[in-house]
């Protein structure tokens, strides 16, 4: 059984325009841009785009009508991952970013300015980040299920008459799981 929770979310959201221009244009991803790459390439899961900090195994990458979804199982036995999980848990890290090589694009002039639409790209890596360029991206933790109740023979019954000054009011016949 793994100790770390699984990471899930959206690494890219289709048609969402980044908040900051890249050079002198904004960028957005069209549906299907990563389809070939996620089918054939090995995509890395990095922590904040750092090649020295590989986060875990990418369990799945799928495009749906909204964007590119992911599931990552963090590696065990790497101390820094505990603090990375803590940053996601406390909301310091909420968004995602992608690293890719553009193969095909189209430039459009919109009210915001020049917008480059990525039509096809080689996806290289996905990364949880503090300040995502596309605010609609998300990462969240999927915690393990709560442990099953103890088997019947391990249940302790406490008789209220045997408890000196209970911190909580315990009624006769109450089952307490420890």
Image (spheres, helix red, strand yellow):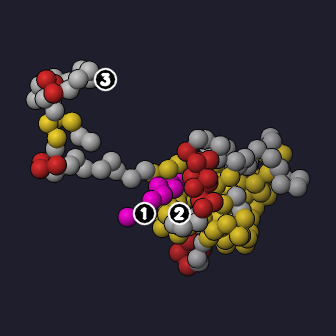
Looking at the image, residue 49 sits to the left or right of residue 88; the answer is right
Q: Which residues are magenta?
A: 1-10
Q: Is residue 9 magenta?
A: yes
Mark 1 or 3: in front is: 3
In three-dimensional space, the C-alpha distance between marks 1 and 3, rounded to whole angstroms, equals 35 Å
| Residue occupying the point 71% across, 70% down | 52
Mark 3 or 2: in front is: 3
Reading the image, the residue beneath label 2 is: 74
Q: Is residue 89 magenta?
A: no
Q: Position of residue 69 (x, y in %)?
A: 52, 57
Dots 1, 2 in contact, CB < 8 A: yes
Q: Residues within 10 Å of mark 2 (few under 14, many from 20)?
A: many
Reading the image, the residue beneath label 3 is: 167
Q: Position of residue 55 (x, y in %)?
A: 60, 64
Reading the image, the residue beneath label 1 is: 2
Q: Position of residue 78 (x, y in %)?
A: 58, 66
Q: Which secondary structure lies at badge 2?
A: strand
- Above or below — where is 173 with respect to 54? above
């Amino acid at each position: 059984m793994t100790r770390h929770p699984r990471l899930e979310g959206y690494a890219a959201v289709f048609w969402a325009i980044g908040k900051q221009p890249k050079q002198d244009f904004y960028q957005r991803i069209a549906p299907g841009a990563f389809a070939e790459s996620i089918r054939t390439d090995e995509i890395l899961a990095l922590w904040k785009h750092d090649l020295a900090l590989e986060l875990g195994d990418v369990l799945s990458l799928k495009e749906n009508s909204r964007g590119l979804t992911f599931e990552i199982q963090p590696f065990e036995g790497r101390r820094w991952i505990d603090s990375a999980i803590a940053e996601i848990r406390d909301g310091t890290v909420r968004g995602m970013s992608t690293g890719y090589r553009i193969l095909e694009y189209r430039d459009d002039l919109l009210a915001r300015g020049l917008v480059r639409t990525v039509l096809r790209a080689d996806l290289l890596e996905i990364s949880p980040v503090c300040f995502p360029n596309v605010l609609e991206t998300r990462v969240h933790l999927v915690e393990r299920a709560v442990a099953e109740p103890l088997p019947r023979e391990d249940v302790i019954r406490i008789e209220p008459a045997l408890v000196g000054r209970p911190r909580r009011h315990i009624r006769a016949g109450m089952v307490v799981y420890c």
